[in-house]
Each structure stands twice: as C-alpha cells, then as structure tokens.
Image (tube, rainbow, N blue to C red):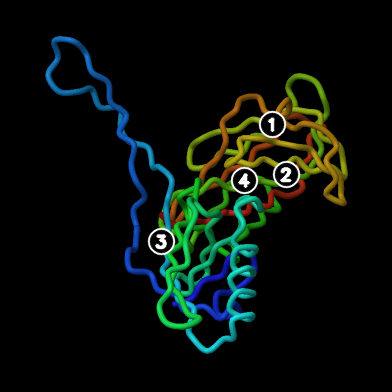
Amino acid sequence: MGFSFNGTTSQSMGIATRITTENRMPDLRNNTITMPGHEGVFDFGETIGERKIQISCFIPPGKSDEDFLSLKDDIIAWLNPDNGLCPLMLDKEPGRVYSARLNEGFSFDKAVRNSCTFDLVFLCPDPYAYAATDETFDIATAGTSTISRSLGNASSLPVYSLTGVIPSGTGTYITITTNGSELKIIGKLAAGETLVIDSSLMTAKVVDAEGNTLRNGLPLLAELNFPSLSVGTNTVTIAVTGNSVTFTELQISARSRWR
C-alpha cells in the first residue's frame, strides 16, 4: 500500500508503507447539555470531528550512510507541516483525495543498518474524502431538471455557477430550488458575469469571463440558503421572474464526498 502527499508518492521516495488501523468513521462530538434535577442529558445530535490517518513506513536497507541521511532529510522536507493542508491520496482508496497535514512529529526508529521505520499521523480537519475527478452538471433551460450523483456516500456541498442577466430593482430575480430548498438570486448580474455560489465555504462572488473576481456576491442572495446535493437523484428547479431577466446556464460542481 502506498500513498501520495502533495503530489509526491511514497514509492518515488523509496518508502514501503502499510495501514494497520483504518478509521472509516471519524470521531464524533456529541452535542448534549445537562440540567440540574434532570437525569441523563438532553441530546442535540452529533457532529463529525476531524479524521486522523495513520500510516506505518519503512526505509529498506541498502543505502550508503550519505544516501540514507539525504533520504531522511528529503522525507522531512516533503512532509513539512509548514506547507499547510495538502492533497493526500491512498492507493487503497483510488479516486478519493483528503486535505491533510502532519498531526504530530515522528522519529526514525532504527531497524538494521541504514534502514528504519517511522509512523505518520495525518490530520484531516475536513473529515471527508472528495472525488479526485468530480461530477459536473450543466442546466441550460429554466424549469425542472433531474441530476444524479453516482459518486460518494454522503450529501455534498456543491458549487453553483449561474450566468444570465438580472437587473437591479424589485420584482426581478431567479430562484434555484434544490430538493425543495429555494435560493432566490436578486440583481444586479450583467451579461458576461457569473455568480459563483460555494456551499462549502458559504460564500458567493461575481466573476468575469476570465474568472477574475469582480465583487462580493453575497448581496445578490436574498437569503443565505446554500444548496446541498443528496446521494443519487436530485431535483433542481429554475424559475425566472421579471420580463427583463434572462437565464443562460447553471453549472454545478457536485463536490462528491465520502465519509
């Protein structure tokens, strides 16, 4: 079993690896409160915590003293947590990518001459694995459309990119209803501009045709009702209100993910 971190594979580093503990379900945080005189606790559900991925590594023997030291230096530079969160891919989970960094330091434990073992613990603040090659959907006409997610096993927080024309003023808007949840988009949105709505970051921005950010897009949302997509079939309904409003296209990046 190998892995790739920040674009570099463990195989290319000359490291043998294995995972002895597979934490498929991240730690949970139970949201409870106690009240004097009440037995037990009041339960307000749970929240998924961070994920930790543990990988055992081995540097095989056969290197000179100089090469052995150089390899350890390269490994430390490769895994430097100062680089921040980086893509982490596991060979046993093809097509999935985590965002991770080292959670703690590690030591090289000598095995035989010029070989050693070491254990890595990666921290994933976002516990989900995301599709390395994501699903995208294009809707070019107003009305009701059905889109089907085939990747992932958890609801996703997509990115919606809307193009069209919405003048400023009352009574002119576009609504996007995803699985019964409505998002109203008011002006102003001009021709050649795209409103990008990111449900994961809970942000929105208006960009030009080259993708350059023009302004904050949150004022264009009548309410902060960011869409989510279920596993499998989803219904998206687009409605246009106002004679001067034009809908051109809605592009959806699913951001499919796994628990």
Callout 2, which amino acid?
A: Leu
- Specify the amino acid type for callout 3: Gln
Q: Earlier in the sequence, mark 1 or mark 3?
A: 3
For the residues marked 1 and 4, what is the alpha-carbon distance in whole angstroms?
A: 16 Å
Along the polypeptide, which appears first: circle 2 or circle 4? 4
Q: CA–CA distance between discs 1 and 3?
A: 44 Å
Mark 3 and mark 1 in contact (Cβ < 8 Å)? no
- Snapshot quadrant of residue 172: top right
Q: Which mark is residue 64?
A: none
- Badge number at residue 162: 2
Q: Secondary structure at mark 3?
A: strand
Alpha-carbon neighbours of circle 3 within 10 Å: few (<14), some, or many (≥20)?
A: some
User: Are the residues tagged 3 and 4 within 8 Å (C-beta)?
Assistant: no
Q: Is residue 139 left or right of residue 54?
A: right
Helix, strand or loop at label 2? It is strand
Which is more toward the observer, 81 or 230?
Answer: 81
Number of the front mark, 2 or 4: 2
In percent of width and height, residue 197 lies at: 67, 40
Of mark 2 and mark 3, the one earlier in the sequence is 3
State the image coordinates of residue 75 (x, y, percent, origin top left). Answer: 59, 68
Q: Which residue is mark 3?
A: 54
Q: In the rendered image of this protein, does residue 89 appear above or below residue 228?
A: below
- Can I make out residue 147 in this image? no
- Distance between the alpha carbons at the discs numbered 2 and 4: 15 Å
Residue type, numbered disc 4: Gly
Q: CA distance from mark 2 to mark 3?
A: 41 Å
Which mark is drawn over residue 185? 1
- Image x and y of residue 121, in percent: 45, 57
Q: Nearer the viewer, residue 171 or 14?
A: 14
Q: Secondary structure at mark 4?
A: strand
